[in-house]
Image (cartoon, helix red, strand yellow):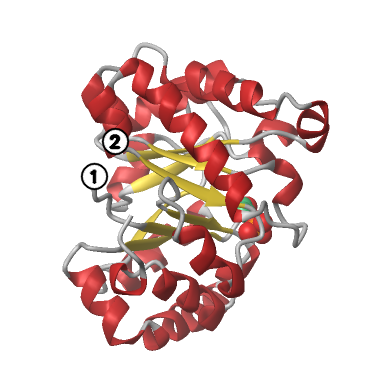
Amino acid sequence: MQRVPLVLGNWKMNGSVQANESLLQGLLGSLGPEADTAIKHDSLQAGVAVPAPYLFQVATRLRMSGLLWGGQDCSNEVAGAFTGEVSADMLKEFDCQFSLVGHSERRQRAAETNELVGLKLGQLLNKGLTPVVCVGESLSEREKGSAQDFVVGQVRAATKGLNDQQLAALVIAYEPIWAIGTGKSASSADAQAMHATIREELSQQSKSAAQAIRIIYGGSVKAATAADLFAQPDIDGALVGGASLDASEFSSIIQSACPAAQSPH
Ligand code: PEP
């Protein structure tokens, strides 16, 4: 099945009104005609996950561009006394198309459990937003040889109780924790092996949803490594942290995901 490649930048807690403006201007100015056309024709999707205070600015700037924008997290609650949280309704009001949930930095810093991540993605699905569900093992799980079981457990917990349609609406981001922000990407063969395992796990729930779902890779993706990753049959794009803060680097990564730049899967 031909899945539309997806490249998302994760700005994390970076940016300022001025820095965002020049980053987005640089990005839009450097995409080039091929990626620009692919984005306009929906044969390529690309976007940025931004800190909530900048959603209005980014929505205004990107509205006519074809690029997507979204949140970095979403509350598991609908509304009320939850200081500091951002609801799916709020993301929707700023025309976000997606939000990250379960990023390892939130799982570690805010002790988010698989169960909480499942509730968060449920809120997004209820509002028609695409949950980008982040999963990935630590270095010690990889060294113990339990990386696949660990990641399958996260995927299973996050997707529990979803129907086929809901399942197909998800994006899974496989991000080995040891590769995030370290400059040490998983090899394309190791990443492909984990993506194939995740797709196999999803196919136990629904064969058609497993074929439709995008599984993107995150962890020190750079322009130099992107094409090799995207050439793998089960790697449908990337979630890019540090490199998404550099307009020309991020633009090159997006260009590498252009269907015209790919050999057919
Ligand atoms: C991320 O934070 O999702 C990420 C993959 O970061 P980096 O690309 O910097 O490793």
Residue 146 in which image quadrant: top right
**Secondary structure type for disc 2:** helix
| Residue at 71% across, 42% down | 177
In the rendered view, would you say 44 is above or below 157?
A: below
Q: Position of residue 108 (x, y in %)?
A: 73, 33
Q: Position of residue 34 (x, y in %)?
A: 28, 81
Task: For label 2, count other residues whose C-alpha is less than 10 Å away and answer few (under 14), some (14-19) or many (20+).
Answer: some
Of 40 and 195, nearer the camera is 195
Q: Label 2, on which residue?
A: 211
The C terminus sits in image quarter: bottom left
262 relative position to 74: left or right: left
Q: Label 1, on which residue?
A: 1
| Residue at 36% across, 11% down | 161
- Say whether residue 255 is visible: yes
In the rendered view, would you say 32 is above or below 190?
A: below
Q: Position of residue 143 (x, y in %)?
A: 82, 33
| Residue at 47% across, 38% down | 86
Task: For label 1, count other residues whose C-alpha is less than 10 Å away and answer few (under 14), some (14-19) or many (20+).
Answer: few
Residue 193 in which image quadrant: top right
Q: Quadrant of ligand 1?
A: bottom right
Of 31 and 187, nearer the camera is 187
Q: Position of residue 259 (x, y in %)?
A: 29, 67
